[in-house]
Amino acid sequence: MLEFLRIPHNFALMTGQASKGKSVKGGQRLTKAHGHALMAEYVNMIVRDSKRTWTTQDAKSRNEQ
């Protein structure tokens, strides 16, 4: 999870800074919800445990604690 947040673009998504001062283009995903989905995907890719996969909700609950 920390490795994911060390990537500047991912950190900006998770802290709501990705869209500050920028005009949003059609189809562009700059929301925290999209960041949670990306975090879950990243953790599943790194951990590779088919018995316990992360969902978007898992990422959201871990990030907002």
Image: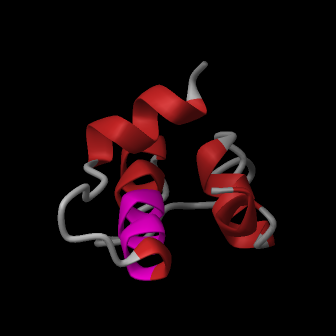
Quarter placement of the C terminus:
top right
The percent coordinates of residue 58 (x first, y second) are 35, 38
Name the residue rendered at 49%, 62% in the picture.
24
Give whichever of 65, 25 is nearer the camera. 65
Left or right, 47 with respect to 54, comes to: right
Quarter placement of the N terminus:
bottom right
As for residue 9 lying within the magenta part, the answer is no
Q: Is residue 45 above or below residue 30?
A: below
Left or right, 11 with respect to 58, comes to: right
**Residue 13 seen by the camera:** yes
The percent coordinates of residue 57 (x first, y second) are 29, 36
Q: Is residue 7 above or below residue 40?
A: below
The percent coordinates of residue 33 (x first, y second) are 37, 44
Name the residue rendered at 72%, 55% in the picture.
12
As for residue 41 lying within the magenta part, the answer is yes
Furthest-top residue in this view: 65
Tell me the chief SS of the magenta region.
helix
Furthest-left residue in this view: 51
The percent coordinates of residue 53 (x first, y second) are 25, 59
Name the residue rendered at 49%, 57% in the picture.
30
Q: For the magenta stretch, what is the residue range?
A: 38-45
Q: Is residue 3 above or below residue 36?
A: below
